[in-house]
Amino acid sequence: MKNAKSSSIFLKGLIFENPVFVLVLGTCPTLATTTTVVGALGMGVAAMLVLICSNTVISLLRKIIPETVRIPSYIVLIAGFVTIVQMLMQAFLPSIYELLGIYLPLITVNCIILGRAEMFANKNTVSKSVIDGIGMGLGFTVALLLIAVVREVLGQGTFAGLPIPFLKDNPIAFFAKTPGGFMVYGLLIAVTSALTNKKAPKKKSFGCASCPSASICDANKLREEA
Amino acid sequence: MKKYLKSVLVLTVISVTVAVLLSVVNQVTLPIIEERKNAASNEALLKVMPEGKNFTEITDLSSYTLPETVTKAYSEEGGGYVIELSTTGYASGLLIMCGVDSSGTVTGATCLSSNETNKAEVSYGENFKGLDSQKVSEVDTVANSTKTTTAYKNAILDAINSAKILKGESVDLRTEEEKLFDSFKEILPNAEGFEKEFISVKLFGVSAVYKATNNVGYIFMYRDQPVATNTLGEVLGDYAADVIDEVGKQAKKHLNTKLKDIDISGFSNLPTSVLSAQKTDESYVLNLRAAGFGILGDSYYGPSGEYIKIKVSLTKKGEIISCVTVSESESANYGAACKEPEFYNQFEGKTEKNYEQIDAISGATVTTTGYLKAIKSAFEAVKVLEGGQ
């Protein structure tokens, strides 16, 4: 039972609720770092590391952090992990550090990380949160890689820096630029939607009850009193 | 109360724990990052001085009077120096590294990092290899990155001067203008600074007039010699009798200039570029507007919608006495150069026949063309005003 649930959590993150193609979170770094395969890999792995760490700790502390300081605590934790990843990368992988540039510290405000903390980690056990982190992180990385492969091969004629004979001399610059990125992104969302048609996530409820801030929201209190 | 206490406590504990964790990781990674930076730096040193051996950083730079742009200096075994400079082109943070050998020749120059827009600085350093300071001044700036490349050039000159200073030679670091104003201060000691004056009437033998910013007097450049006067135009100091005589006359003429407003609505043929006009007994002062890039430009970022405002004085025969750009809203790295004295001073003494023989602003054709059109209209305006129509 536990195994089945774990694999379903993992598969959700990877495919059925893929953060990039289904939940459409983290769009900004997606478009910015998918111009090269190496950049996409670096960003994906960095974000995954942060996601796993933040999911773990937030799940661990979920019963201890009071509602009133929930968001500040999460942000401090996430920012801390991002800074650690930043320092380690600057020391040990400087070329990728330079390649990612400002998008590395921007992982702090990547919607995927805070989103999973709010939607999953603060309501589930540590082991499940870890699996969710791995699943979502891999889903992010795989998604970035898919877009990057198209954009680098067609847009620059290289793959991870290695030139491809015919394409290197005839690159289609459109793909290397933002509009091309949007187009590839959109097409891949369509492909994913077609593939996961039968197993689409339940329609999200939009009422007050499912909102993460329900317990401290004044509007909700007024609604409940009414 | 207890509820808030728990919140504060939890957040504080989390913050402190994260801070401790960060400092631990920092301790581990900082030495590695520093070493990497130094290795990269050494690589850069060899790039600008390939024949260099054994670079040592000079740590007490404050004991030398170096140009402001110098941030670091390294001495090299063979008597050469590598200078790191930080200057401002279009944006600040233009970091340049320049190697100068023992004979004062540039061995190489490279840009370490920059925030410029057109990226001309990436390869501009190649132009300076093997040049001494004289030839460096003659290197052309790049047309669409005038500010960037001018700053780069000046940084290279600073590097050459710094190498001389570090060797123990004394170098005059003053700009041409500073040297000029210092020579003025010798004959007008109370002056704090100087500003070039706009001359409305043609002065015989006087090429320029400067006013002391603290109103203690004037400097008249009479036949290339600066002559000081007090605020009434009386010559101060010893000169030949004819010099005192003539300068005194010209000074009084300049200081007693009376400008009369002209009602331009009465002139139907007056060029539309003339915004207002004044006259003296022998000259006209016109305020013109020029349609430069601000009006005619069609770039993505849109023109500013502002005209260039020019003030020009001309004799009745149509010779320009003074010309100054009062205001402009052209593009910063391009047409804005029309606000520089080096540009508008070129029109002094020009007539309708030769007013186009000036150095245009490279990369700013629309601005220059608009400016020249306005100058041409000034000549036409004088004819109209003289004709009394």
Image (spheres, coloured by chain):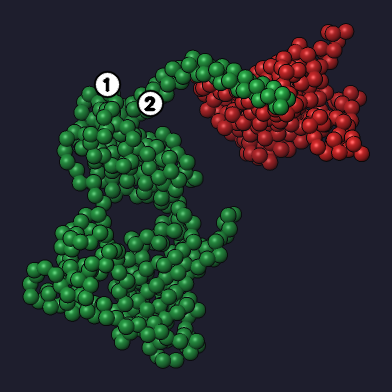
Chain colours: A red, B green
Can residue B53 be seen at all in this image of the molecule?
Answer: yes
Q: Chain of mark 2?
A: B
* Residue at 16% from the left image edge and 38% from the top image edge: B169
The answer to whether residue B47 is above or below residue B104 is: above
**In which quadrant will I find the N terminus of chain A?**
top right
Give the residue type that dot 2 points to: Ser
Q: Position of residue B322 (x, y in %)?
A: 32, 72
Label disc, if present, on residue B41 of the rendered structure: 2
**In which quadrant will I find the C terminus of chain A?**
top right
Disc 2, SS: helix
Disc 1, SS: loop
Q: Residues within 10 Å of mark 2 (few under 14, many from 20)?
A: some
* Residue at 91% from the left image edge and 25% from the top image edge: A198
The answer to whether residue A180 is above or below residue B51 is: below
Q: Position of residue B207 (x, y in %)?
A: 23, 70
The answer to whether residue A48 is above or below residue A31 is: above
Q: Are marks 2 and 1 on the same chain?
A: yes
Q: Quadrant of residue B167?
A: top left
Can residue A167 be seen at all in this image of the molecule?
Answer: no
In this view, the residue in front, A54 or A72, is A72
